[in-house]
Amino acid sequence: MSAQCEPMSVDLFVRPEGAACGAASVPVAIAATGEFVADDRLHAARERIWDRVLRLYETGLFPGISVCVVHHHQRVLHRAVGYASVPTVGASYPSTVEALGHLSGKGVPMTPEQPACLFSASKMVTAMLVHWAVEQGDLCIDAPLSDTLPQLVGTALGRLTLQDVLTHRAGVPRFPKEIPIDVLFDEKASLASLIPLNPQSITEDSAAYHAVTGGVLAGAALASVYKMGLPRLLDRVFRKPLGLRYFSFGLSAAAQRGTEFVHEYITGVKPNVLLQQWVSRLVGASFQEVVRITHDPRFRRAVIPAVNVYATAEEVCCFFQMLMQHGRYGTQQVLAPATVSAALRPMGGWCFDRQFMLPMRYSKGFMLGANPLGLWGPFSEKSFGHLGFTNKWSWAIPHSQTAVCLLSNGNCLAGAPIKPMVQFVLEVQRLGGLFT
C-alpha cells in the first residue's frame, strides 16, 4: 500500500448542456489507506477508470463522487472528487443544487472515508442477513411469513415467503396510496400498513420491484426471530467480522455531527410528467420527496432495511470480496459457501419487471448481469450487485475477482449521464481482462 497522499485538486473542462465551456478546479482526495498497482498494466487501467470518473463529474450532475475498485484484494482505485455537501437554493426544494454551483469551489470536499446512503443497494445487505438466519436454522426461506410473524396469520400477506420477498415476486411493491412516506420512520407502523394489502398476481416470468416494502417484511422477520434491533444484528454478522467502521442502518449520533457524511441533492433539469409518474409508481413517492427525506434527521436515526444502510465505497467492496470468496474474509468464515451460492443463484432467467417496466435478472437479494449484455456490462452473467436510486452503482465480477462501488450524491432523472456511465462500466470490465 502506498502512503497517504496530500489533498489535491484537478482542473476539469466542464461541458454542461446549454452552458459555455470553462475550466473548473475541484478537490480530489485519495484514501488514507492508499492505492496499489503491481505493474504498468494495472497502472494504465487505473488511470483509464479514473478518467471515466472525471468524465462523469464533468457532466455537472454530481456534486461529489466517491469510488473504490478492488482487484484481486488490492485497492487499485480509491478516491473521491468534488463535494460531500454544497450550498442549495429554493425554500421549497432545499435539496436542489444551484446549477453547477458545486463546480465553483463552494462546499465541503468529499473524501473516500465519508459514508453515504446506499438507497436500494441496502437490499442486498438485508437479504444476506436473511440468508445468514436461514443458515443458522432460525428462518426458512420457503415457509409462509405467518410462521414467523403471528400478526400475519389469516392474511393474504401471511401466505407469502421470504423467497417471494427477496426476488421481488411478493406482489406488494409499494405502500397504499393514503400512507404518508413518514411511516418509514416507524418499523411497526410500516408493517401494519401492509397487512390489509392483497398481493398482485405474479408469474414465474414476471416480477414487481419492491422499493421499500420487501425490506419491511424481511426486517420484521429478522427482528421477530432475534428479538434485537437490526443494527445490532448487522454489527454481529457483518460489520464487526469485516472490520468496518460504518456499514449500518442509519448513522450514529457521532457520525451525524459536523461534515462526516455525504448529503444527497437533486440535480439536472426538472423531469417531465412521465418520468415523475414512473418514479412515484416505482418508489411510492415523488422524486423530490425521496431526496428531501434523506435530509430529515429521523431518516438517519431510523431503521429502513431496504433503503438506509450507510457505508463507504470501500466497505461495500469488502462486502463483495467476502461474497466472491464464498463467505470467507481473511481468516474468518463469515458465511457458509452454500449460503452464498444460494443467495447468488438466479431465480429463473429474464423476467419482466412491472415496476421498472424493463427485463431484469434477479437472485434472492441481488440484481444480476447477463450474456451477451446485462446490467453490469457485456458478458456479465456471473456478475451481481445492486443499484441505489439514480446515483449508486455497486457490483462484483467474480471471474476477475473485481469489486466496484461508485457513490455519488447528485440525483437526476432527465438527462442522466448514460454514455459516461456505460464507458465507466466498460473500463472496469477491461480491467478484468474481458477486453484488451
Image: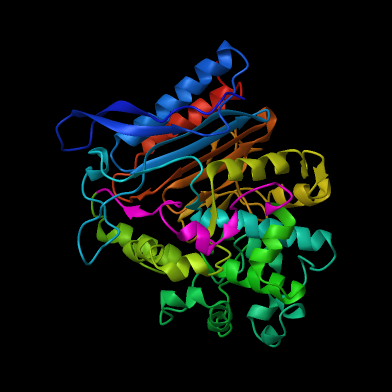
Residue 215, above or below 175 = above
Q: What is the span of residues highlighted in magenta in the rendered image?
A: 239-268
**x and y percentages locating residue 77 in the rendered image:** 53, 29
Q: Nearer the viewer, residue 4 or 423?
A: 4
Q: Is residue 258 visible?
A: yes
**x and y percentages locating residue 285 in the rendered image:** 39, 68
**x and y percentages locating residue 364 in the rendered image:** 68, 56
Q: Which quadrant of the structure image shows residue 264?
A: bottom left
**x and y percentages locating residue 32 in the rendered image:** 54, 34
Q: Residue at x 52, y 66 (%)?
A: 212
Residue 15, above or below 406 = above
Q: Nearer the viewer, residue 430 or 259?
A: 259
Q: Residue at x 33, y 27 (%)?
A: 10
Image-based side of 426 in relation to 126, left or right: left
Image-based side of 332 in relation to 18, left or right: right
Residue 4, above or below 89 = above
